[in-house]
Image: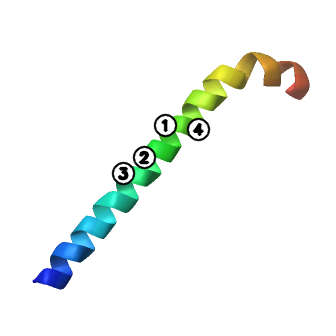
């Protein structure tokens, strides 16, 4: 039971970290679109 609780906490923290990283990456891409558009095109 304790192992299960630790496992759930670990998984939720990992998911939260992944979501936060994902949101940060989106935010950086949104901010960098004007700069990168000139380079890519």
Q: Is 5 situated above or below 12?
A: below
Per the image, the residue denoted by label 3 is: 16
Whether the residues at callouts 2 and 3 have beta carbons within 8 Å, the answer is yes
Q: Where is residue 16 in the image (x, y as percent from the top left)?
A: 36, 51
Whether the residues at callouts 2 and 1 have beta carbons within 8 Å, the answer is yes
Residue situated in front as seen by the camera: 4 or 41:
4
| Direction left: furthest residue | 1
Q: Residues within 10 Å of mark 2 (few under 14, many from 20)?
A: few
Which residue: 19% across, 83% down?
3
Per the image, the residue denoted by label 1 is: 23
Q: Where is residue 13 in the image (x, y as percent from the top left)?
A: 33, 59
Q: Residue 25 carries which label?
A: 4
Q: Distance between the residues labelled 2 and 1?
A: 6 Å
Q: How crowded is mark 3: few (under 14 residues within 10 Å), some or many (20 or more)?
A: few
Q: Is mark 2 on a helix, strand or loop?
A: helix
**In terms of sequence position, does the residue under pointer 2 or pointer 4 come before the other?**
2
**In terms of sequence position, does the residue under pointer 4 or pointer 3 come before the other?**
3
Q: Is 25 situated above or below 27?
A: below
Q: What element carries label 1?
A: helix
Q: Where is residue 17 in the image (x, y as percent from the top left)?
A: 43, 52
């Amino acid at each position: 039971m304790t192992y299960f609780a630790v496992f759930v906490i670990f998984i939720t923290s990992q998911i939260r970290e992944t979501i936060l990283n994902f949101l940060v990456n989106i935010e950086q891409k949104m901010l960098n679109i004007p700069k990168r558009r000139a380079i890519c095109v």
